[in-house]
Amino acid sequence: MTNSVADIGEASCILAIGTNTTQAHPVLALNVKRAAAKGAKLIVANPKEIVLCEHADIFLQHKPGTDVALLMGMMKVIVDENLQNDSFINERTENFEEFKESLKKFTLDYVEEITGVPGENAAEAARMYAAAGTASILYAMGITQHTHGTDNVLAIANLAMLTGNIGKPGTGVNPLRGQNNVQGACDMGGLPNVYPGYQRVDNPDAKAKFEKAWGVKLDDKIGLTHTVVFDKALEGEIKALYMVGENPVLSEADAGHTRKAMEKMDFIVVQDIFLTESAKFADVVLPGASFAEKDGTVTNTERRVQRTYKAIEPVGDAKPDWWITSQLAKRMGGKGFDYNSPEDIFEELSSLTPSYGGISYERIKEQGLQWPCPDSGHPGTPILHSEKFPSASGKGKFVPLEYRESDELPDDEYPLILTTDRSLFHYHTSTMTRKVEGLNRLNSEELLNINPADAEKYGISDGDMVQAVSRRGEVNVKAKVTDICPPGVVSMTFHFAESPTNELTNAAIDPVAKIPETKVCAIKVQKVG
Amino acid sequence: MEKVKLTIDGLEISADKDKTILQAALENDIYIPHLCYHPDLEKVAVCRVCMVDVAGRGLTISCRAPVEEGLVVKTDSEELKKVRKVPVQLLFANHKTDCITCGKNDDCELQRIAKYLGLEADELNRLRFAEMDDPIDDSNPFFDRDPNKCVYCGICIRTCSELQNINAIDFSNRGYSTRVSTFGGGPIVESRCESCGECVVRCPVGALLPKTTEQPAREVKSVCTYCGVGCGILLGVRGHKIVSVRGDGENIVNRGSLCVKGRYGFGFINSPERLTKPLIRKNGELVEAEWDEALDFAAEKLKSCKSDEVAVFASAKCTNEDNYVIQKFSRAVLGTNSVDHCARL
Amino acid sequence: MKTKFEDIMVKSEKEWESMQCGEKPVILVGTATCGRSAGSLETLEALRSEADKSGIDCTIIEVGCIGLCYAEPLVTIAKPGNPAVCYGGIDAEKAKELVEKYIIGNDPVPEYALGTIGQGKIADIEKIQDTSVFKPQIRRVLKKCGSIDPANVEHYIANGGYSGLKRALEMTSEEIIDNIKISGLRGRGGAGFPTWRKWQFCHDAEGDQKYLICNADEGDPGAFMNRSLLEGDPHALLEGMVIAGRAIGADTGYIYCRAEYPLALERLDLAIKQAKDLGFLGDNIMETGFTFHIKVKEGAGAFVCGEETALIASIEGERGMPRPRPPFPAVSGLWGKPTIINNVETLASVALVMQQGAQWFSQVGSEASKGTKTFALVGKVKRTGLVEVPMGITLREMIYDIGGGILNDREFKAVQTGGPSGGCIPAEKLDTPVDYDSLNAAGTIMGSGGMVVMDADNCMVDVARYFLEFTQKESCGECVPCRLGTKQMLDILNDITQGRGKPDDIDLLEEIGYAVKRTSLCGLGQTAPNPVLSTLRYFRNEYEAHINKKECPSLVCRDLISYKIDTDKCTGCRLCFKACPADAIIGEKKEPHIVDQEKCIKCGMCFEKCPPKFNAVVCIPGQLKDGE
């Protein structure tokens, strides 16, 4: 998030697009709902009529995968009606004219045709967003999990820059991160192209810095991403995998492909707290300590680095992950893994990660700090880009965009779009929540949400078991007939191993971010028996 | 904030101008009995027990009356004694008083008020006691609703509407038949309740209680392990187990709020299904092993791979320190940048 | 140059004249709700068909209620050249007879007549103003009820209607408020707060948007003053509302009326449409640039919604629950805006003040309570009805002159005013003047105008219990003292009336009553103990008899009375024996019978069946044991 969670309350308009906030980020959603109750305008853009719509002033129900068209259409209205923030555009951005040119095509009629959103509604939303003194955009996987996810994000950034809604309180481009330390895992260089602090592995200076610090020679070739690892494994290039706290057999798009890849690999080490569906493919399973059993820090969606404290001893012989990995490293001859405590590690990482440079255990004992926090006197950064953008010129660059269709669209054989979603009561592949009896009672099985019109068309009644079939796989699941899904669109979560939704999803990826298109694939449904 | 000075029971105190008499008193450790007041919520003044005597005004509901310069407040007087006791006596005559086995025992605002006012058995026995036999709603897996202990302060309702904007419950019926009810009166689990438990946390009596009321021996600060919002929590520890979770009111992100997973989803930590020993595949089966054996085996196998034949998945569920070590291991030991995690899923 | 209003007035007067002094007989039929329940629609139908059949050209008009409930259905016939004659108890048969005898013939049928209205005399029929019912009354607010067609706005205008608005629009807000101040008008809804002062608060409150609300949620059991006014003269309210809106600076008014008043709602809707069409309501009223809109909001009939803040909550679409004050509605009311809530009668009086002048208004009434007040006079009086009296009249005059005394000439015991919020006044206080302050001093309130007369057959403990049952049911349940206090008091009263009273209960009732009054959140709770406290004040002996002797002196509370058979008088006719549903009568044929007190369920069947010539079964206070 460019801004903070608490800062949402400062916004006089909130655009929530591609986020089912009340289900996936319930406590953050409180800020949204409270702001709306206090009078802030709320625009919800989502293919499904999600709970947040109850609090919305405008609901834009666009077809899955048409975000670029919707946002470009809105921006065209803003430009046509001269509602843009000229001074911000002049002072803080570049490439506006080229971008403006790319808007031309996105007339309201064209936008309506692509998105299904009545043009006037999109225009009204555009005016509402542009007229608000402070407007914040929230988004989540509904924006990113597309083959054109990068375009979606760029469209959002364009919209924020067009109206000057970035770099000040109550504004921002605010991705809501899904996992409790997904931000930190990225910050720490758990990515194939960067060292900690987003220092690129192909930057010779960065490489030299880490070579010096770690005392080894490092590779400057960018590594493989998650999705590509499985492709390469099937091709026989990747033979071994060391996997900590992940469950790709359920979470990866086109899970059948993943399964095959894992079967093919020669050696897999899994480090986890449960014997997950994926751990069953392992050759060695190492029991990790849960979050309650170790000290450390995690970084939330607003870049706040917070302390967690060990509450109990690890169960059985389980060990903290840092200890296990260090042991492996040492046993393989690695140097520099003689850590005595997480604080040791933190001191090392903060010395190498400029944005964490000023953070120490002592400073975040009570309250966390938001990076960038470059030195020990720095108060942290609640709002990014308040003076300049992290580009060579320091300016925000408008990127002209085209609407691109999703990789797999419905056709006669697979007439429905499947989009994936989350439940309030479960988390990701449910390795943790399925172990909590009460949560299982509140949500005990996978449901395929289907519009009454579609249900009638396919002879499905509420509660029927249906088979959902895509080009990649098939899943049996109970149908829930509901008009929260529009006709032509069905949705499922992926919390249940019994109905593994990702057997169906499409693994086509965004060329830049390498994110699979789990939000759009074509399926058919038929009643079982 | 501008301050004003006022006198409570002869003690001069200073308070922010936007405070009420009750808030000013509580901040200065002066107890005024109250039931329906909650600092997070609108002040509705329905319990009527926070009355004080304000010079020149007489009996005044202190939870709503703003402080003013020079106000002279008495928290007790003959007239207050006379009128304030009655609502509290009536609450007792309409309350299931199984205090010793009640999960709220010793932490109950009604008990506290009764003790403060000095209720006497002789006085109570003159009253007509209601039969407290309304059915308990135990449909929610995490908490029970016992209408026989409800004092109708409305704190749960206001929490659900003002703080959570969910509106799963409201008052139904009128007069003595008033109940806190879901839409249509069905069990809470069938309502639009999201089981966040915020109402349970705020209930001043035993009407809303967690299913397990085991108290922790100590609490440890942490951060919720589920989504990326990063809510501060306090893990309740008893022996070697986590027995409760509370929202950390000091935490700037959530200011004490939690969702159903954050508050009640901690059972996995002590789940019998947890991995407690390293496992090694032998003859196709994963069998338990000691750490040295497992680590040595894994190290040996990984060492045999070339750098471009191995990949590493870090974890968005692990700490920064864990992830740092994992990517360092990948790059510095395995020699590959093929380290990634499920950021995209 | 004539203004548009003057044109309308001239036209209206012509219309009214033509009806009043025309060639055709005019028949007025009271078809307000009260008339309809007595069968006036059948009467109306009979008059129409009879007139049709006989080919008589006459004008038949439906009018509101003139207040003589005891004499419904009411028909008034005005033949050209004669004073109008008002007839009571006219069913379909009698209606036909009237057409035949008086419309076609010339016999005014004095035996059905209640009196004549207007100039001139008819033999054997008294002038209605001279009858004892009307003599003590001064009908101002209700003047047009029953004499004009409520569906015809011209009737209203011809009788001075909307001239008050015209005048008000020529004044500043301050001048209007000043006029109301001079008139001495106090709120007719119950508490009697000076109307001008309330308006002043709202007028002075900051805010661009202000609201006026008319409280037409008449909720007291037995009260129907507002309903009659709305049904009989709806424009009076609208005129008063526009004037009030002008005075306080509101551009929108709400009429909060209970859905149980369908006819009143129908009449209001029509009247609003008419007023809009004439330019007396809506944008640019009477071309002065003043804008005022009226919306009707139907309430679901909760008593508590008569409380101002609960009413506001209800209009906002919330559950009808009172809100703590301050802030007062005049500062922060409907949707947080300054809001005035006035009762129907208050607003109708405002129209009169502006039509006739403040001086005229204050000519009648007492020192601190000016003008007239309408009452629904019900209970054990001979003539029940809707009356309007000058403030300061005594209770005795109302009950004995207007009401004609106690039914069956029994002994007066008490009069209850103010509904569930009021109290009971005993015989020794009958000369209390009816004004806000005197009634307060006597332990009751003026209220909105309910007046229930009770005789020796009314048990005062039971009366208190009845009102408590009402307030307990109607309590919104929000605040502790009202929700639980009314229930506790009701439980105690139930115990007392059922023979389980304890000596301590009287003190307990007083303690709880006092605390409920002092600590309740809204007016409902703050006044709910009044019926108990006032009966404890004046009829403590009845409570003591119930508790200490287990006797109900008024023979009302079943558990505290007994039936016994006077063996000297009983002839053993067995009528009682056969009637007893509980086999509680013992005795052989032709031998005196006795009541088995263990089995007796106090149904009173034996008492009813015993032939008057024997009068052997008697009902006595107290609980007889077998053998007594």
Image: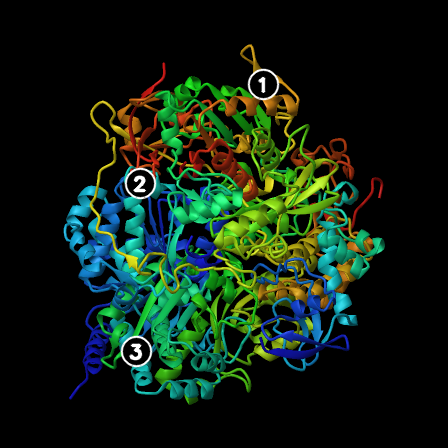
Report the residue at 37% width, 23% height from top: A237
- Does residue C478 appear in this view? yes
Under mark 3, the amino acid is Tyr
- Does residue B165 appear in this view? no
Q: Above or below — where is A442 with respect to A103?
A: above
Report the residue at 85% width, 54% height from top: B122
Q: Which residue lies furthest to the top in this view?
A: B283
> Which chain is disc 2 placed on?
A
| Residue C215 picture quarter | bottom left
The local crowd at label 3, few if under 14, some if 14 to 19, many if 20 or more residues have their Cα within 10 Å, is many
Residue at the disc numbered 3: C162
Q: Above or below — where is C31 with respect to B53?
A: above
Between marks 3 and 1 in the image, the one whose residue lies nearer the viewer? 1
Could you tell me which quadrant the C terminus of chain B lies in? top left
Name the spot of residue C617 as percent of width and height, x first. 72, 45
Q: Establish whether labels 2 and 3 are both on one chain.
A: no
Residue at the disc numbered 2: A512
Under mark 2, the amino acid is Val
Between marks 2 and 3 in the image, the one whose residue lies nearer the viewer? 2
Report the residue at 73% width, 36% height from top: C572
Residue at the disc numbered 1: B280
Rounded to the nearest whole Å, what is the CA distance between mark 1 and mark 2? 38 Å
> Which chain is disc 1 placed on?
B
